Image (cartoon, rainbow, N blue to C red):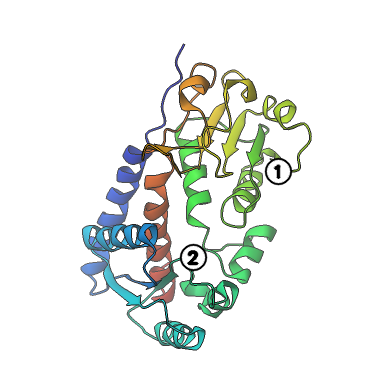
Amino acid sequence: MTAPVINGKQVSEEIRGNIRKEVESLAGKGFQPGLAVVLVGEDPASQVYVRNKEKACHDLGFYSEVHRLPASTTQGELLGLVDKLNRQSNIHGILVQLPLPGHIEEKAVIDAIAVEKDVDGFHPVNVGNLVIGDDSLLPCTPAGVIELIKRTGLEMSGKHAVVIGRSNIVGKPVSLLLQRENATVTMCHSRTANMKELTKQADILVVAIGRANFVDATYVKPGAVVIDVGMNRLDNGKLAGDVDFESVKEVSGPITPVPGGVGPMTITMLMQNTLIAAKRLQGLA
């Protein structure tokens, strides 16, 4: 029996509908959430992401600034812009699009963003608060993953979740968020010796390793929820996830497709973070 598909686009639209209503309500009080996005260089994928964020701001009624800087921009110039945005009262969220050109240290830029405006959830203070369970702005993709699991109706408490991948952007934070939901979490990575043994125990399997179609049906426990965070461009130009969707859907429970699964959630959670940050900075939280 083929598994039900988790429609990330539909879930994303439902959340955006709620955000839109709240932004309209704030507009009635003379207040507009503001997001600044900074793009350095000409990376094609980054340009697409930035355009999508700009469109989301327009669609939801946010104030938006996009700063497109040449690849020759120095680290000092970029840090100067971040400092300006930190002090700008109509900007409540700041996102510097990664990756940055090689001569700019990403950590220095992330550290320079004001914690309360760090809508990517990458600042060490926000990461630290996530680790100890304090309130923080959550990394967007991991937050989207948790939202999609919740929408399946699965009670995460007491379940065994296995995360494949240990990146700072997805693997580590999603494992912490799963623990917040009282799941028992196992993390697998490139050095895991008995990966298939572990993944076949998972009630929830989150895959974020950047290898097209790596996980097939032999990795999956029957009925498990499978969340595919991968986004890989194949030689034929098509997109593929880290999960072999066609084989796994015959074994799994609810499963995300690629595209149309986790992808639409990331920008939506960014907008939600910006709304939260704006309300806090305005004393409306």
Residue at the top extreme?
1
Q: Which mark is residue 269?
A: none
Coordinates of residue 225 in the picture (x, y in percent):
54, 29
In the depicted view, which residue is nearer to us: 95 or 23? 95
What residue would you read off at disc 1? Answer: 190
Residue drawn at point x = 56 percent, y = 72 percent = 106
Q: Is residue 222 left or right of residue 132?
A: left
Work out whether residue 250 or residue 155 is closer to the camera in this orientation and state it: 250
Residue type highlighted by circle 1: Ser
> Quick check: 119 above or below 265?
below
Few, some or many residues within 10 Å of mark 1 (<14, 14–19, 20+)? few
The type of residue carrying mark 2 is Pro
> Label 2, on which residue?
99
Residue ID at (51%, 63%): 137
Q: CA distance from mark 1 to mark 2?
A: 22 Å
Residue occupying the point 38% across, 55% down? 267
Q: Position of residue 217 (x, y in %)?
A: 58, 21
* Above or below: residue 77 compared with residue 151: below
